[in-house]
Amino acid sequence: MKNLAILGATGSIGDSTLSVCRDNAHLYNVTLLLASKSVDKMLSLCLEFTPRYVAMSCSAATKELAKKLNKENCSSQVIQSEEELLQLLSSTEIDAVMVAIVGGAGLKTTLTAVKAGKEIFLANKESLVMSGQLFIDAVKKSGAKLWPVDSEHNAIYQALSPKLQNTLGHCELTSQGVSKILLTGSGGPFLNTSLSDFANITPKQAVKHPNWSMGQKISIDSATMMNKGLEYIEARWLFNASREQLQVIIHPQSVIHSMVQYIDGSVIAQMGNPDMRIPIAHVMGGGERIESKAGNFDFFSAPEFTFSAPDYQRYPCLKLAIDACYHGQHATTALNASNEVAVDAFLKGQIQFTQIAQLVERVLQQTSTQPIHSIEQLLELDKQAKVSTLEIMRRDILC
Ligand code: NAD
Ligand code: MG
């Protein structure tokens, strides 16, 4: 039995992870649950799983949860500070960590678990996008075992040889005959919407993904295809891929989760229903196949599979992310930070859908080119980019 920590336990990935835990109770002890402020949901999870430890990043939520747990006579111990949480994550009490916090807020906890050499189930792509080389260096130094949870990266991982799987971050794709990584994406809910209607897209329309059920931020990122852009950067780091080795393909049915093309012309794809319990069960099984309850894909009632190249006029965020990937760490960190602020503003009805890309582009234009050597520098740049996004919004958009 492994002791599992779930960071972001009350979200969409948290739900899917706990579903896999329910079906494989002989493999994992749910030892630590962390979330932000959904106290009632966390309370019900504690009553069901009785984790040894529980933590909320919001201090008011921490107090409220402690009171409610006490009333229910639940034995889960409430972590009182970030320091205590980071210590626990580094300790021998935790073997594996599902990193499912949304956004850059996940960076510190993720890096702590990486540095402690834990088994890392990585769903939180933003932390890798932000910290890139620093993250990969930390994995190599600590010997942490990295498992990609994002469905595309998990599909790619499954299509690679064990030699590449065991050297994520610094693998040599060409040494194993890989010619290209084909990153598929559905194109989101606006694949066929007229461009002239884009400015009027509402948050309610944008969060409605045609195939996947996900948290709000990643749903908006999927609609702009910033999600595929972040995934492109994620793939660049995980698979040590060059520009020539990475290609994005639109596949609206979301059945092929990504593919690897080899020099002999073979293409290996991983397929299945669009259900995150599949990649989660894959990583939690340590590569062995375990129950996921996601069901089998029915080929006889399958729609036709179609493929096309992305249109950057429709998806300017995808282009911004791919360009940022080759400008360097300062650019990917600023891109991620400004996107977080812009998506939040869009969800609050403060900016139009099309202004997400415009804001990110303007922040990137004014971000100074600077090599990043430390997490402190990175966090400072993240803060500056968020402030710049808000300033541009206040000055030129919100009036
Ligand atoms: P979500 O919004 O549904 O859940 C986010 C979770 O993070 C919640 O439990 C929330 O309480 C917690 N959280 C937020 N801020 C926190 C903080 N500062 N400290 C601690 N916990 C905090 O998001 P999601 O859809 O589950 O996505 C989580 C991550 O997984 C994202 O990085 C996303 O890109 C990635 N991902 C999600 C999916 C999916 O299908 N949902 C697929 C692939 C990758
Ligand atoms: Mg994905």
Image (cartoon, grey):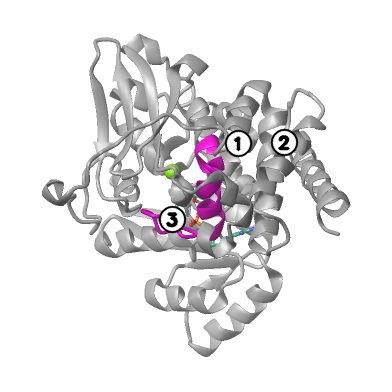
Which residue is depicted at the point 52% across and 43% down? 227
Rounded to the nearest whole Å, what is the CA distance between mark 3 and mark 1? Answer: 19 Å
Residue with the most extreme bottom position = 71
Decide which of tag 3 and tag 1 comes sooner along the chain.
Answer: 3
Amino acid type of the residue tagged 3 in the rendering = His
Q: Secondary structure at mark 1?
A: helix
Name the residue tied to disc 1: 316
Picture coordinates of residue 186, whole percent (x, y): 40, 43
> Where, quadrant-wise, is the N terminus in this rendering?
bottom left
Q: Secondary structure at mark 2?
A: helix
Q: Mark 1 touching mark 2, by CB under 8 A?
A: yes
Q: Is residue 113 visible?
A: no
Which residue is depicted at the point 63% across and 81% down? 64
Which residue is depicted at the point 44% across and 36% down? 146
Q: Secondary structure at mark 3?
A: loop
Magenta stretch contains residue 201 = no
Ligand 2: quadrant of the figure: top left
**Which span is picked out in magenta?**
207-230
Which residue is depicted at the point 44% across and 68% down? 51
Task: Determine whether the beta carbon of the residue marked 2 sits less than 8 angstroms from the nearest atom of ligand 1.
Answer: no
Q: Mark 3 touching mark 1, by CB under 8 A?
A: no
Name the residue tied to disc 3: 209
Amino acid type of the residue tagged 1 in the rendering = Pro
- Left or right: 250 with respect to 357? left
Name the residue tied to disc 2: 361
Please tell me how crowded label 2 is: few (under 14), some (14-19), or many (20+) other residues with Cα within 10 Å: many
Is residue 14 shown above or below 155? below
